[in-house]
Every structure is written in C-alpha cells, then in structure tokens.
Amino acid sequence: MNTAAIVILSLIGAWLILFFVVFRIVRKLHPFPIPWQVALVIDNPLRRILQSPPKAVRQVGVKKGMKVLELGPGSGYLTLETARQVGGEGRLYCLDIEPRLIARLKQKITGEGLENVALLVGDGQALPFRDSSFDLAFMVAVLGEVPDKDALLQELSRVLRPGGILSITEMLPDPDYSLSGTTITLARRAGFQPFQKQGNLFTYVVNFHKPNHNTREVVRNGKIR
C-alpha cells in the first residue's frame, strides 16, 4: 500500500472516530430513540454471531411460564426466542415507542404462529400496566435512549412483582452505551439490587432483583461495584 493510500485511509478513520465521539456526546446530552430504520439494520447476521438470541435470552434469565416484559424490542431480535422460552404457559409483552417497529414485529410474530405475545406501542416512562404485573422485565441497548432514566426505572420497579427480575444489557459500539457501573448506580437509585453480572467491557448483562424481605444483594460471575 502506497503512502497516499495510507494517508487517505488514516484521514477517513480519524473522521469516523471524530464523528462517533461527537455523535455520542450529542446523544448523551439529548437522548432520544434511535431512528426506526437503524433498528432494522442492526438485526443482521454479524450480530447473531456476536450475540446469539438463545444465549442472550438465557443470560437475561427467561424461564418457562414467566410473564415477561421486553422494553424496546425494535425489530424483534430477541422476541421470537423469548416467546419460545416462556412457552405456552407464559406470556411476553413487547412495548416500543415506534409504531412502525411494532408493525414489523407483528408480521414476524404472525409468521411464526406465536400466540403468547402481546405487542403495544407506548412510552417506557409511563408504562400501561398494573402494579406487580411481571416476573421479569428486560431491555437491550435501550436505557441510554430514554430521556428520563429515573422515571423509566421507577416504572419498571412498579410493574415488577416483589422479587421480580430486571435485566439490562449494553453493547458497544452503540453510541448510547454506558459502563456497567453507571447502569448499576441508576438501577440502585430506583431500589433495585444487582445480583448477577455477565460479559465484559464490550457487551455485558446485569440482572437485578426488585427487593422483597427475602432478597439481598450478592455477586455472581463478576464484581458488582
């Protein structure tokens, strides 16, 4: 490779890095849901290699018979596998703020013949569910997009039963990615207790309990800070 080509590639790389940094700063200052088209793009074969749906759903803690809330399912990358895992005795509710993604997901659900999934358009900061409705709630690369994260986590605490599980997954190179320590601090502020951390710096899952008189904070598969 000649010198000119190296210089051009270096400049392109520098501009890409600069764009990512600036974009991340803007997203941190003014969080908002990603454009719905982006959610379609990130559902791709490469992601399935890096984060297979069966493994991801196991890490979240989904089990047969559970009543589960998936917040921000996007195009449904984990939805079909989650629905299969909860089985006929369980129920999966998927809520997204973007109607076009819910419409797309409805086509997938219908095509698979799944009857244990309910799809709703709504805002996670004001969940349309009764108190203590769910055994487990999870979100993947969603927390950073929400303007009022405290309101979101308080709502999730409200709709989870005592002892229920909240699972939060974050991944790079998502521009809304937060370090696990930041995620744990936010969830603790809403009263959640971390009990399991999996993954690494680039992709991690932290699972929390909504406290009852029998739950306490413990550490598994990673150091909870």
Image: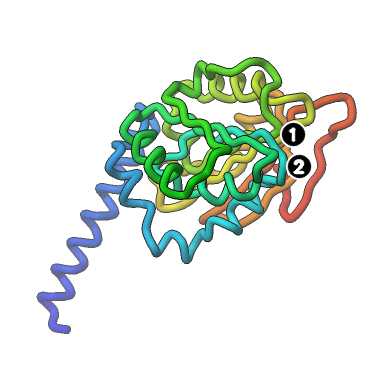
Q: Amino acid at mark 2?
A: Phe
The quarter of the picture where residue 183 lies is: top right
The quarter of the picture where residue 15 lies is: bottom left
Q: Are marks 2 and 1 in contact (CB under 8 Å)?
A: yes
Q: Position of residue 214 (x, y in %)?
A: 89, 30
Label 1: state its secondary structure.
strand
Residue displayed at 67% across by 33% down: 67
Which quadrant is home to the C terminus? top right
Q: Which residue is mark 2?
A: 195
Q: Which residue is mark 1?
A: 209
Which quadrant is home to the N terminus? bottom left
Label 2: state its secondary structure.
strand
Distance of label 2 from label 1 (alpha carbons): 7 Å
**79 shown above or below 132:** below
The quarter of the picture where residue 206 lies is: top right
**45 shown above or below 56:** below
Q: Amino acid at mark 1?
A: His
Q: Label 1 crowding class (10 Å Cα cut-off): few <14, some 14-19, many 20+?
A: many
